[in-house]
Amino acid sequence: MINKNDYMMDIGLEVHIRLKTNSKLLSGSKNAPKGEPNRHTNHIDLGLPGTLPLMNACAVRQAIKLGILLNSEIAHYSHMDRKHYFYPDMSKGFQTTQMRYPILTGGYLDIPGNRRVSISHVHLEEDAGKLIHGEGGTLIDYNRCGVPLMELVTTPELHTTDEVFHFLKTLRALVCDHGISDANMEQGGFKIDVNVSVRRKDNEVLGQRCEIKNLNSFRLITRSLNYEFERHLEEIANNRPIPQECLSFSEDSGVNSAMRAKENAEDYRFLPEYDIPPIHITRELIAQVGKDIDSLTAMDKVSASTSEVDVALMKKYPKAYTYFKELCNHTPEDTAFKLVYLYLIPVFNKMQIQFTWELVPIEVLLEVISLVNSRSLDISNVRDILEEYVISDLNITELLANLNLRLCNDDEVIISMCKEVIAQEPETVAAYLSGSTKVLGYLVGKVSRLCATKGKPNPKKIISLLQRELNTIKDHER
Amino acid sequence: MSIISRLSKSLKSRSITYQDIWKHYLGNIKNYNDVLNAVVQTVPLAQIEHQPNEGSMLNGIPIIYKDNICTTQLRTTCASRMLQDYVSPFNATVFNKLHAAGSVMLGKANLDEFAMGATTSPELYGATKNPWDLALGTGGSSGGSAAAVSARFAPIALGSDTGGSIRLPAYFCGVIGMKPTYGAVSRYGLVSYASSLDQIGVAGLSAQDIAYVFDTLGGTDPQDPTTISLPTNFFSRKLVQPPQATIGVDYSLFSPTSAGHHFILHLKHAGYEIKSITLPPMEPAQQCYYIVACTEAASNLSRFDGIRYGGKPSQENNLDNFYRTQRSEGFGQAVKTRIMAGNFFVSPGNYENYYGNATRYRRYLFDTYEELYRTHDLDCILMPVCSDVDTAAAGTRYRYELDTYSVIANLLGYPAVSFPVSMYGSRPLGVQLMGRAMKDDVLLHVVNKMQEYNDVLKSLPPFGGQDLI
């Protein structure tokens, strides 16, 4: 019997990532694999005689984006190849992919556990259609045919199912966060093939490699890998050779079994795709794509000093990020963050318009900040004043004047309101007096609502006056 | 002289009508197509689709399209059983451009199956006959197009040229056939044979006609990313300028009695500068061509599986058997040979030896020719269209060496034109001019000049109609 602990797995991953684009890789049809069957197909997708492919520039940009994020080498020259095989879901008799000159080579992804996983290469390719087997025969849906994919290949340097899990989770989050893919596993937007071999830990030579195809959930990958590890150990223990083959995992039996022998011996007769000119990626284009994600990656850097919620907000509104950064040059980061993401953005959201720098210049926000600092403007009114600023032609000083006019600043009125509320809420008041200070907010709210009928109240004033009234009662009771 | 401008002038002066033109050419087809078998589908007079465009020279001009160019009005069969009943749901870009210019389609021309061959004798339609001598062939693969122009079925016919497919039949049928610079004309809607070699070609009776048609066809097409942008009137801009060009000649390629040899004197006399050069050997280029063409053909023809279109209805349940039946019955022998050879050239263990070497040789050949043009400051090179042996056989039988001289232009993406220069017994013989990329205008200029000198094209073949005017 052999000791399991003496052995380890070497695992490499091939991840098929469906790209988020409007149209397909080589035609103007909509990238919508889920639509009514064959609705999103055109002459090119169906491979009609005389049609020529048209490369989707957006898919190339998405690949560049991933290349920047993975620190890969982005090929200044790459081209498409044809991979030949006959299958009814492949309308041209070949798949358009990249074999000799992939768009990205090298790079790495850092995963939890302080591990850095090397990327071998990433290439662009098109998806195939789908066969629907029914009683009356087999039907073909070409909606998915030509949908853009990226295939990411890692070096075989993962060793445990946990590492595989962390790698895939990190990669998936990365492509989702940057709008490269929806990476929806149930819908086939993030498909994984696994290469695995087993060797003695003290042996430097990798064992015989097997490939497990189409694993579409993290759970299946773990189960399939665990099974494969045991299977290899058993073969090794019995001194039986392990054939290099393609396997598929059956969820029901929990077993990996070899696919048809033919699929293992496929000869794809790769050939350069001459109908598509080579893809030349200039430094300018990389810089341009880099700008799109600069703000997003920069956010990851500030995440050290900010909470997770803050980072999420920044990522959600990347356009406001440069604005935020600019503001940081004039005011402390936490004030800037609060003002931009908690006050300014909600104003735009409420009016359902996109955030634009021009509508609220930096100077305006700086003016607002100085007003708040000098206590001329209460922070609770910032949102209102910004909203009015966006709508009206008035400047901040004029808006503040209007606001103050409407403020209910008459102490007498507020005191009478406070008294009214105290009379209405004897139990809450009793609770406050017995030391439960958190009920104060409730009482303040009630007073504000009463005051609102007379004009806009200043919450600070309400609090101070209400506290004064309550303290009077306290003193009386003594 | 330009037939298109004659017809155009007469239409404008109202001395003839569109109907007169169309009736005349349809009449020629009716009278002679039975013996020539140049056209395989015809548009009846009542069904001619005309979108008048008064501003265009091509308004009302009849055109015949090779049957591997997609059209919605007639079937696009590629002379193959595979596409026997296939009607394209879209028109080729070249068709759309010519249609918008006001020209009309009269019919579709015979070809070797999927343009593979040099005899125009597909199993589906049978051979096209030479209007000069019915015992002779037309060459191919655009034999139908060249014969149709020669027999006056239309002043212009469109073909395709992968290794000489427009130039060889133009040579045998005594007309002008030109393949432009790779990328000058959109291939969208041309059923692909070998993507890196294919170009749309034009057969006509004058350099001017061909220039006018190419001016309409040329330039970028958003649907074909391999197209290049061209200056306006690129093809016709040098037609009438005084003779000024340097032409390279490898004298070893012309026997002293050949048509080409005499033509060199004519060129000198007309004022062109002739420089003696030595061309690289033709044989390796020929081999290189066959490897590239067959390999790309095998790939391009993989889409014909009988599933979405074409093929025959079948109850076959086994997928492999389905493919086998559809493809063995759908393709003819010439096509199958190329598919099998092509797959062999890239099969495991063979790729580097065959396809890899061919690709490298192609690059080397390009560098060699560029160097040749540069060091001798040449505008174009004069070459035979095919060997004397093949000239005598006139494309009746297929020989591997038939396209020895014509494949170079395709391998290198150069423009090339073949045109008749003298009569050989009862039929015209011609030569070929091959320019560097983007020298199309110079080629047409030389052909136009030499046509003024001695217009062989005025002679009519015995089996064919007359010009209308």
Image (cartoon, rainbow, N blue to C red):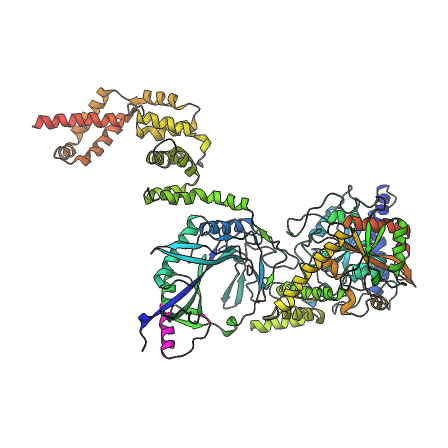
| Residue farthest to the front, as pictured | B375
Instruction: Pinpoint residue B116: horizontal percent, then vertical percent.
Output: 72, 65
Q: Determine if residue B178 is in view.
A: no
Tell how many labels: 0
Tell whether position B384 is magenta.
no
Q: Residue at x 88, y 44 (%)?
A: B15
> Which residue occupies the foreground of this view, B288 or A477?
B288
The correct choice, above or below, for A301 with respect to B368 in the image is above
Instruction: Pinpoint residue B393: horizontal percent, then vertical percent.
Output: 84, 69
Q: Residue at x 82, y 65 (%)?
A: B387
Instruction: Pinpoint residue A189: horizontal percent, then vertical percent.
Output: 45, 56
In the displayed structure image, the side of residue A256 where residue B366 appears, left or right: right
Q: Which residues are magenta?
A: A226-247
> Which residue occupies the foreground of this view, A138 or A458?
A458
The correct choice, above or below, for B3 with respect to B292 in the image is above
* Residue A429, image quadrant: top left
| Residue farthest to the left, as pictured | A478
Q: Determine if residue A89 is in view.
A: yes
| Residue farthest to the right, as pictured | B425
In the displayed structure image, the side of residue B448 where residue A125 appears, left or right: left
Q: Quadrant of the N terminus of chain A?
A: bottom left
Tell whether position A231 is magenta.
yes
Instruction: Pinpoint residue B33: horizontal percent, then vertical percent.
Output: 83, 62
* Residue A385, image quadrant: top left
Q: Quadrant of the C terminus of chain A?
A: top left
